[in-house]
Amino acid sequence: MARLHFFAPLLAIVSAGLVGCTQQSGSSQDPAPPFVFRSLDLNQRRKDGQRDWDLKSPEARYELSSRTVRARQPKGILYRNDRPFYEISAELATVLNDGELVVLEGSVKLQQLKDQNVLIQGDRLVWSPQAARMVIDQRPEALDAESRLISKSVTFLQDTNTLRFSGPTQLLQWKGRRREGVTPESDIRAADGQWNLDSGDLNVQGPVLASQPDERKLRATALKGNTRSRHLDLLQPVRLNLGKDKTVINAGLTRWDYGRQRLTSMVPFQAESPTAVATGDGFVVDQPTKTLIIPRACRLKQPGEALRAQRCSWNWSTERLIADGDVVLTRSDPEQVTRAARLEGLLSEKQGMRFTAGGQPVRSTLRFSPGKDQANPAPNRSPVQF
């Protein structure tokens, strides 16, 4: 980017717009009074002739000795491929060294004009036009239709359309559209990261802690995602606390589809609830229905009882369980083995696993040890019910 030279244009405007410049007698060391203009219109072009940026103000002062412009209510346009790409505004602007540095202060807004229409805002922005870099270091935040990102400092890289943020960082997400005064669906706390506003790719360093309604919590070492496809990948180890029902999942890499409120993993995991322990090769958590789906190698255990199947669906709120594919249910006292293609039932901390086969064939085997029951009576607990 070429250096901005606007000293000559300013002198050309003096005769038409000067309202406050006067010559005063006195010492030769007295600073020259500033040039005051009714309006200011600065623009910069790239080396190839395409528009780079414009900046306008209804009133500005130019200090000749320091080569500094001070303008109020500045508004401007940043261009990309010679087309408007961002709109920028603030309450005050200071242009230093004939454009080497621009400082915007007070209600600074950088509004994307296409794609995700992201709004970047804060109280102070330091802009280096030659480096195509903007730093917001006072109350920075970025907003799109569904979320708000708040951080300690934000750097916007114009050439790559990338937002870099320095933590601590807070990412708030709403269900549907972002609405002020409405509690967000997710409150994510993390550290540094970056967000590419072209591709939507988001990378955030951890540790990551997310809170949701009904006391649901997520923990991960870091996250990667994409705001266009509305998903976040939680990096292992991952811990999911499913809320008031006190079900906890310890897992590896997990994809969080926050648009549909679903969490999916393709690697082994373990889930614990007050009534049972579940394991399997991957899972799907459907948050709206409070359902845990184990698509492969489902295993469930309770004291004295165990179930295995090809696939399971478990509602951790109602304790309803559906097991499909080569289902084997075992119980240790008395020894009982039940086999079926499908079982449906409930998990109960006091009464154990209670199932119905729904008209499907069921085969059960019972084995009793003579004298065992008299010497060591079993707890008052009924056998598996069908």
Image (tube, rainbow, N blue to C red):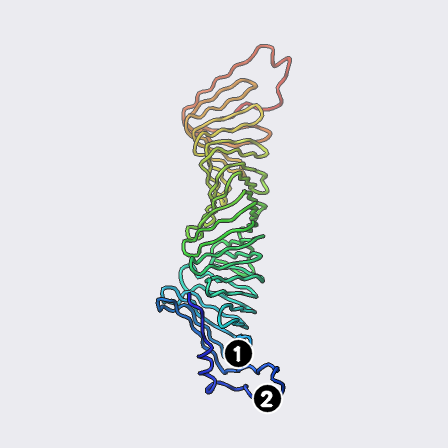
Residue 143: image location, x then y, percent:
50, 59
User: Horizontal and vertical percent for residue 205?
Assistant: 53, 47
Q: Which residue was labeled with disc 1?
A: 62
Q: Residue at x 51, y 22 (%)?
A: 330
Between marks 2 and 1 in the image, the one whose residue lies nearer the viewer: 2
The x and y percentages for residue 264 are: 46, 40
Return the mark for residue 263.
none
Q: Quadrant of residue 248?
A: top right
Q: Return the residue nearer the eye: 272 or 56.
A: 56
* Element on which disc 1 rests: strand
For residue 133, above or below residue 351: below
Q: Is residue 260 visible?
A: no
- Where in the figure is residue 341, as x and y percent of width and height? 41, 26
Element type at marker 2? loop
Measured in 3D between alpha carbons, the distance from the residue under mark 2 to the one under mark 1, in whole angstroms, is 17 Å
**Which three-letter amino acid code belongs to the residue tagged 1?**
Tyr
Q: Nearer the viewer, residue 346 or 299?
A: 299
Q: Residue furthest top?
A: 370
Q: Nearer the viewer, residue 289 or 242?
A: 242
Residue at 54 percent across and 27 percent down: it is: 301
Q: Say whether residue 350 is visible.
A: yes
The disc at residue 24 is: 2
Task: Tell me which amino acid carries mark 2.
Answer: Gln
In the displayed structure, 203 sits above or below 281; it is below
